[in-house]
Amino acid sequence: MSAAAPTPEPRPFAVHALTALLAVTALATAAVEWLNWYYAADGGYALFVRTGWALLRSLLFLVLIFHLWRGRQGAAPFGLILAVTTIFSVARLVVPKQGYPALPGIAGFAVVALLCLGVVLLLYRSASVREYLARPRTRWWIGRDGIQRRPVEPRPHVPGWVLTTRVAVFSYSALMLVACVVSVGLLFDGRPALLPLIVVWFVFALVVSYVALFLSIFLVKGRRWARVLLVGLTLGVLLVHLPLCAALLGADGLVRDGGPLLVAAVLALWGLWRAGRNGHFTQAPANPAREPSNA
């Protein structure tokens, strides 16, 4: 005989409002990106790649909704990085290479910027949302008494700035790959000699993704050496990515493809500084009971 499953706690109104705002932001972002493609007079391969990536990024708002409804702590920093990079992504598509941007594009950018600002404000300023994301986690269990929803052991608290840094460094690889794919168009413009350099750029972006994943694991655990290596990784990414954008894609590519990564790097470094200032890298081990005893 199975026990009746308990009714889950209702979500606060602010969570429902934020969910609706995220859905509207995703639709508005996709609409503005399509509108810019329609009005662009200097389209081409580069604009096609950047617009395609921007449309894929708009789907990440749906992923954020999933994390929000599950009450995951990482929803807030994920939303911050997504909102900031979305604003820069839309801005680089609205501004043409020559002349002035179309009026519908400017209006669309303003709408997206206001929506993203609203998302960040609700994630970080709404007490109901913060309490919902900090609530104890529960899972469904199957036992002798049937199917029940029980609380699980809470994970060690991770400061928000650490999670922000983690999300920011994860974005390095994707931002580099977009610029790398844009530079592939140079091969079809009669510059095949650039192929080795583009391949190295591509491989470097993939290596960065694995290194960032490895270091982020120890960053959450408060290891100082992970903090130092992440600073080195961030500086190394900037020293490689920005010059390549300038050399292969020109000043326009440096702004459009180097700017978003620079913003992500600043957020990552700022997060590391704030986490260190709050004592995250001097705290005791997360699970002291598992540490070997000296007795």
Image (cartoon, grey):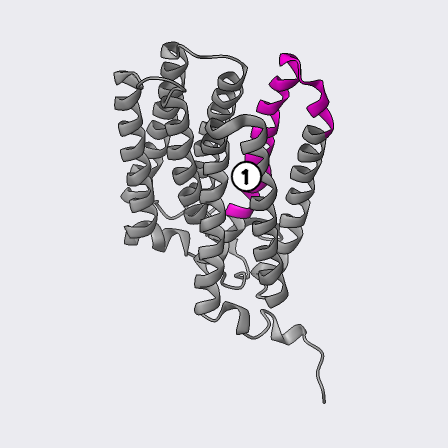
Quick one: 253 or 45, which is closer to the camera? 253
Q: Which residue is pictured at 45% across the width and 50% down the height?
A: 267
Kind of residue sitting beneath label 1: Leu
* Magenta segment, prevailing SS (helix, strand or loop): helix
**Whether residue 246 is situated above or below residue 215 in the rendered picture:** above
Q: Which residue is pictured at 71% across the width and 36% down the height?
A: 203
Residue 137 seen by the camera: no
Left or right placement of residue 56 versus residue 195 in this view: left
- Magenta-highlighted residues: 168-196
> Helix, strand or loop at disc 1?
helix
- Dividing the picture into quarters, in which one does residue 19 lie? top left
Residue 110 part of the magenta-drawn span: no
Quick one: 287 or 277, which is closer to the camera? 277
In the rendered image, residue 243, in percent from the top left (x then y), is placed at 57, 38
Residue 173 part of the magenta-drawn span: yes
Q: Residues within 10 Å of mark 1 (few under 14, many from 20)?
A: some
Quick one: 229 or 22, which is closer to the camera? 229
- Dividing the picture into quarters, in which one does residue 103 lie? top left
**Whether residue 45 is situated above or below residue 21 in the rendered picture:** above
Left or right placement of residue 219 versus residue 109 in this view: right
In the rendered image, residue 34, in percent from the top left (x then y), is placed at 40, 15
Q: Which quadrant of the figure contains the C terminus?
A: bottom right
Q: Which residue is pictured at 43% across the width and 37% down the height?
A: 85
Would you name the residue on which mark 1 appears?
242
**Whether residue 173 is situated above or below residue 222 in the rendered picture:** above
Q: Which residue is pictured at 54% across the width and 69% down the height?
A: 281
In the rendered image, residue 135, in percent from the top left (x then y), is placed at 41, 56
Residue 29 seen by the camera: yes
In the rendered image, residue 184, in percent from the top left (x then y), is placed at 63, 21
**Whether residue 160 is situated above or below residue 40 in the rendered picture:** below
